Amino acid sequence: MTSPEICIKSMILKSVMPTTPTQHDLATIFAEVLQQQKPGIHDNFFEIGGNSLKLIQVNQKLKEAFNRDIPVVNLFRYTTVHDIARSLDQQEESDLFAGRQNQVEDEIAKGKETRKQRLQKRRGDII
């Protein structure tokens, strides 16, 4: 049997409204697809009226809003605004890190090439 404390904690968690831009966008998408008010960030998509067909609609809207291809299987795995937002933000951070890493690698390669050209020029001047 479920205790009253667990029920109250569950209600409090579910009523948490979006705080980040990503959460706001996701909650708006959920509300549009489900044709209801914005859900709390811990509301499970399937428990508030969602189904697999509506999830496909959410997926399409996410692609448009975030310019990313998000696998539908991830939306079955992450069913709350909070979880999807966290996943998207982590992916963005990971993409950003990968971009920085590529930029550093490019700068290192350019530096090596410049050094090589200087060395070749010096050898040419000496000979």
Image (tube, rainbow, N blue to C red):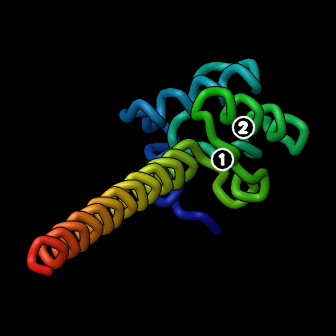
Rendering coords of residue 85 (x, y %): 51, 45
Q: Position of 7 compared to 59: left or right?
A: left
Element assignment for label 2: loop
Q: Quadrant of the N terminus?
A: bottom right
Q: Which mark is residue 55?
A: none
Rendering coords of residue 82 (x, y %): 50, 47
Q: Position of 66 compared to 94: left or right?
A: right
Q: Nearer the viewer, residue 37 or 21?
A: 21
Residue drawn 50% across and 60% down?
Answer: 6
Rendering coords of residue 73 (x, y %): 77, 58
Q: Which mark is residue 48?
A: 2
Is residue 120 at all visible to an observer of this figure?
Answer: yes
Q: Nearer the viewer, residue 15 or 75?
A: 75
Q: Please name the amino acid that badge 1 sits on.
A: Asn
Q: Position of 43 compared to 23: left or right?
A: right
State the image quarter where residue 114 is shown.
bottom left
2 and 1 marks in contact (CB < 8 Å): yes
Residue drawn 46% across and 49% down?
Answer: 92
Q: Please name the amino acid that badge 2 sits on.
A: Ile
State the image quarter where residue 51 is shown.
top right
Pointer 1 residue: 44
Residue drawn 52% across and 55% down?
Answer: 87
Rendering coords of residue 112 (x, y %): 25, 71
